[in-house]
Image: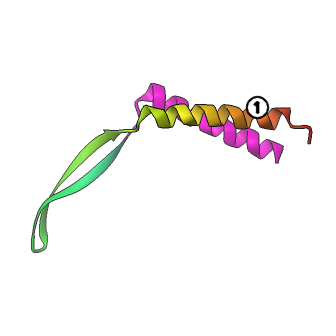
Amino acid sequence: MRAILVIVGIVLLVGGLWVIFGHASYSQTDTLVQLGSAKLTATHDKAIPPWIGISGIVVGALLTLGGLMSKR
């Protein structure tokens, strides 16, 4: 259990740092016009909000420290 907490904490910590410093984004596709089976789509790159990265860093640090400090 202790090793799982440390591993999950490190993954969240690294993911949070990637969001904050790596400018992470995702693609979203919207359908603009659809006539029958033909459709016109547009793809937009959207940034992941920084608060998600910050919360990942905080939760990851807490899980890592909790896993390292646990007595079992």
Question: In the rendered view of the protein, which quadrant contains the C terminus?
Answer: top right
Q: Position of residue 18 (x, y in %)?
A: 50, 31
Among the 4 quarters of the image, the one containing residue 23: top left
At horizontal 82% and vertical 48% (from top left) the residue drawn is 1
At horizontal 31% and vertical 41% (from top left) the residue drawn is 46
How are the colours assigned in the image? rainbow
Amino acid type of the residue tagged 1 in the rendering: Leu
Figure check: 61 above or below 1? above
Residue furthest toward the top? 21
In the image, residue 21 lies in the stretch drawn in magenta: yes
Numbered marks: total: 1
Residue furthest toward the right? 71
Among the 4 quarters of the image, the one containing residue 2: top right
Residue furthest toward the bottom? 36
In the image, residue 45 lies in the stretch drawn in magenta: no
Instruction: Determine the main secondary structure of the stretch shown in magenta.
Output: helix
Figure check: 20 above or below 6? above
| Residues drawn in magenta | 1-25
Side of 19 relative to 7 (left or right): left
Q: Position of residue 37 (x, y in %)?
A: 13, 73
At horizontal 44% and vertical 32% (from top left) the residue drawn is 50
According to the picture, the residue beneath numbered tag 1 turns out to be 65
Q: Position of residue 52 (x, y in %)?
A: 49, 37
Among the 4 quarters of the image, the one containing residue 69: top right
Front residue (pair 46, 55): 55
Figure check: 2 above or below 14? below
Side of 8 relative to 17 (left or right): right
At horizontal 29% and vertical 50% (from top left) the residue drawn is 28
Side of 47 relative to 64 (left or right): left
